[in-house]
Image (cartoon, helix red, strand yellow):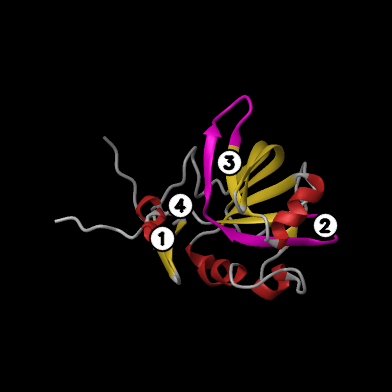
Amino acid sequence: MKTQVPLKNAKWIVEPGCVLLVAGGTADRASLMTFSWQTPVKTMDPCLVLLAVNRVRYTHELIRRNNELTINVPGRSLLKQTHLAGTVTGRKIDKFAYCGLTPVKANLVEPPLVAECAGHLECRVVDTHAVQSHDLLICEVVDASAESDFFDGAWIPERFQTLHYLHGKRYGLLTHCVEV
């Protein structure tokens, strides 16, 4: 039997997306946010990723200054730090330090990578569409890297579990792969 879902909870039917840490800014002033509203929109030539970012977020402000960002993939071992990054603003604190994460220089963009994360995309914003309180940022991936023990063209869930946001303080884990 199926029950009616209140529209305010409808998005949880299509969640959970892989949780990310998105960083904006520069080496001198960076911040990051916990993030799960993303999707690839083109896989190559160039690879494009769409992010839906609330305009009131400080990281959004930093991204808009230079139209660059990094997308960092945390796993199970970073659950507490990842959740914490989504509960405070970086306007008045160093969010990297507060969350116990290490910013490291990216190869091609100004915002830093999160050293503890297993995968990274360096991106430049190539298009923006305003939708109510959010901006849909179309991001071109200009550099990508991942831990080879965990990634062989896709995540190996038996070795690395991506986090999937469920609601509130609840997360799921991708634990194994199935094939058809």
Q: Residues within 10 Å of mark 3 (few under 14, many from 20)?
A: many
Q: Nearer the viewer, mark 4 or mark 2?
A: 4
Q: Residue at x 26, y 34 (%)?
A: 180
The residue indicated by pointer 3 is 50
Q: Are marks 1 and 3 in contact (CB under 8 Å)?
A: no
Task: Name the residue that disc number 2 marks.
Answer: 27
User: What is the CA distance from the residue labelled 2 to the residue labelled 1?
Assistant: 38 Å
Q: Earlier in the sequence, mark 4 or mark 1?
A: 1
Neighbourhood count class around disc 1 (C-alpha, 10 Å): few under 14, some 14–19, many 20 upward: few
Question: Marks 1 and 3, Cα distance to the nearest angstrom?
Answer: 22 Å
Q: CA distance from mark 4 to mark 3?
A: 13 Å
Of the image marks 2 and 1, the number of the one nearer the N terminus:
1
- Find the distance from the CA under tag 2 to the CA under tag 3: 24 Å
Identity, as a three-letter code, of the amino acid under mark 3: Leu
Left or right: 5, with 27 as reference point = left
**Numbered disc in front, either 2 or 1:** 1
N-terminal-most mark, 2 or 3: 2
Disc 4 to disc 1, C-alpha distance? 18 Å
Mark closer to the chain start, 1 or 3:
1
Number of marks present in the image shown: 4
Task: Give the magenta range.
Answer: 25-48
Q: Which percent across, then down, holds residue 31?
A: 73, 62
Residue marked by disc 1 = 8
